[in-house]
Amino acid sequence: MGNPPSPSPAERLRQQIVFIAEVDKLKEVFRQTVLTQSRRAENSAEHSWHFALMIVVLAEHSNHQPLDVLRILKMVLIHDLVEIDAGDTFAYDTKNMADQHEREAIAATRVFGLLPPDQAAEFRALWDEFEARTTPEAKFACACDRFHPMLLNCLTEGHAWQKHGITQDRVLARNAHVADGSLAIWEYAVQMIDEAVAQGHLAPKG
């Protein structure tokens, strides 16, 4: 079987615009974390923007150098698009995490499949790379992805942690592989978590 014929330039543009219109829906997917000022729920598009900016600012702290920062930014900007179909899965929701990857993989096939074939294949490969966490770029991307909600929780008096009864040991266990991407960021996170416990914003280990 050969490759499918490439769409005409006009059809290619139409497919790309359909995709761009579809992913606007990410702005309607809300997370458990809240914003530091208004304290409203953060949406997944806002997370993706903040996450991407973190990559640019913090890339020098990766365990592995040099990094392909542009490739990481592409991963970051597309990684959560699957939540349009699959929704956001709370990091400590063990029931829904059981089939999270399966649900999100199905969503990836549909959402990325709106694009022309070459871009659909590129985006799916980047999504799979992030999920596998084996390359330096994916490890650093995952480190920042996990650090971001911890930071927001610390800046909002442990909002989501307190709402769901999360304890220090669960936060540490859930996020320990941040160290695979950046030991420096993980050490900062551990100090940040210790301070949250001392301030009464995160319950200590049981």
Image (spheres, rainbow, N blue to C red):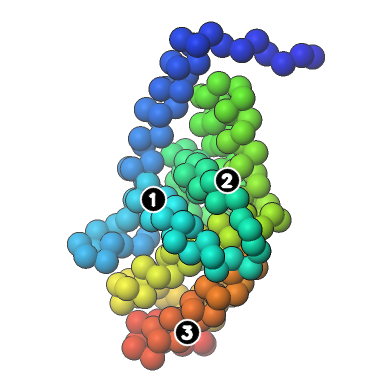
Q: Which amino acid, by three-letter code, is at mark 1?
A: Trp
Q: Which residue lies furthest to the right in this view?
A: 1
Residue at 58% x, 36% y is 123
Q: What residue type is labelled 2?
A: Arg
* x then y, percent, for residue 3: 72, 16
Determine whether label 1 and label 2 are within 8 Å by CB.
no
State the image coordinates of residue 86 (x, y, percent, origin top left).
49, 43
User: How far across and how far down the image is residue 45, in percent?
Assistant: 37, 46
Spot occupied by residue 185 in the image (x, y as percentages of width and height): 52, 73
- In this orientation, does residue 168 appear? no
Q: Distance between the residues labelled 3 and 2?
A: 30 Å
Disc 3 + disc 1, Cβ < 8 Å = no
Residue situated in front as seen by the camera: 126 or 66: 66
Give the residue drawn at x 58%, y 60%.
140
Q: Residues within 10 Å of mark 3 (few under 14, many from 20)?
A: few
Q: Which of marks 3 and 1 is nearer the N terminus?
A: 1
Q: Nearer the viewer, residue 146 or 206?
A: 146
- Asked whether, in this view, residue 70 is left or right of residue 41, the answer is right
- Other residues around mark 1 within 10 Å, as few (<14) / some (14–19) / many (≥20): few
Q: Which residue is drawn at 63% across and 58% down?
A: 66
Q: How far apart are marks 3 and 1 (CA)?
A: 25 Å
Question: Which residue is identified by label 1?
Answer: 49
Residue topped by disc 3: 191
Q: Which of 69 and 119 is in front in this view?
A: 69
Query: Label 1 to label 2, Cα distance in Å?
Result: 15 Å
Helix, strand or loop status at disc 3: helix
| Helix, strand or loop status at disc 2 | helix
Q: Which of marks 3 and 2 is in front?
A: 2
Furthest-front residue in view? Answer: 66
Amino acid of disc 3 = Gln
Rendering quarter of residue 176: bottom right
Q: Name the residue under label 2.
A: 71
